[in-house]
Image: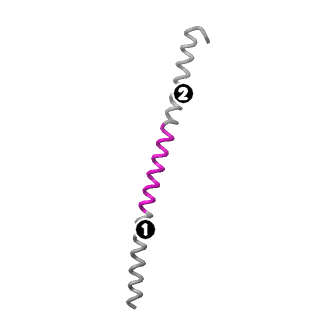
C-alpha cells in the first residue's frame, strides 16, 4: 500500500510539472502569435493607408507638371 501511495505521489508530481511546462509553452505560443500578427499586420495596414495617399500625391504632381 505504501508503494502504491509513493507511486501516486510521484505520478502527481510529474503531472504537475507537465502541466506547468504546458502552460509555459501555451503562453510562449500566444505571445509568438501576437508578435507575428503585429509584425505582419501593422506594415500591411500602413501600406493600405499609404499607397492611396502616395498615388494621389504622384498624380497631382504629374498633372501639375502637365505630364498627365
Q: Above or below — where is 6 with respect to 38?
A: below
Q: Above or below — where is 53 with respect to 21?
A: above
State the residue position of label 2: 51
Give the spatial CA distance, label 1 vs label 2.
Answer: 48 Å
* Secondary structure under the numbered disc 2 in the rendered image: helix
Residue 36: x and y, percent?
49, 46
Q: Quadrant of residue 15?
A: bottom left
- Residue at (43, 57) in percent of width and height: 27
Residue 5: x and y, percent?
39, 86
Mark 1 or mark 2, earlier in chain: 1
Q: Quadrant of residue 64?
A: top right
State the residue position of label 1: 19
Task: Indicate the quadrant containing the C terminus: top left, top right, bottom left or bottom right.
Answer: top right
* Secondary structure under the numbered disc 1 in the rendered image: helix
Magenta residue span: 23-42
Q: Above or below — where is 56 with respect to 27?
A: above
Point out the residue furthest to the top here.
66
Amino acid at each position: 500500500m505504501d508503494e502504491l501511495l509513493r507511486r501516486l505521489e510521484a505520478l502527481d508530481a510529474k503531472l504537475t510539472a507537465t502541466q506547468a511546462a504546458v502552460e509555459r509553452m501555451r503562453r510562449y505560443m500566444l505571445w509568438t502569435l501576437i508578435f507575428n500578427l503585429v509584425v505582419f499586420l501593422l506594415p500591411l495596414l500602413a501600406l493600405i493607408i499609404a499607397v492611396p495617399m502616395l498615388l494621389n500625391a504622384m498624380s497631382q504632381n504629374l498633372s501639375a507638371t502637365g505630364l498627365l
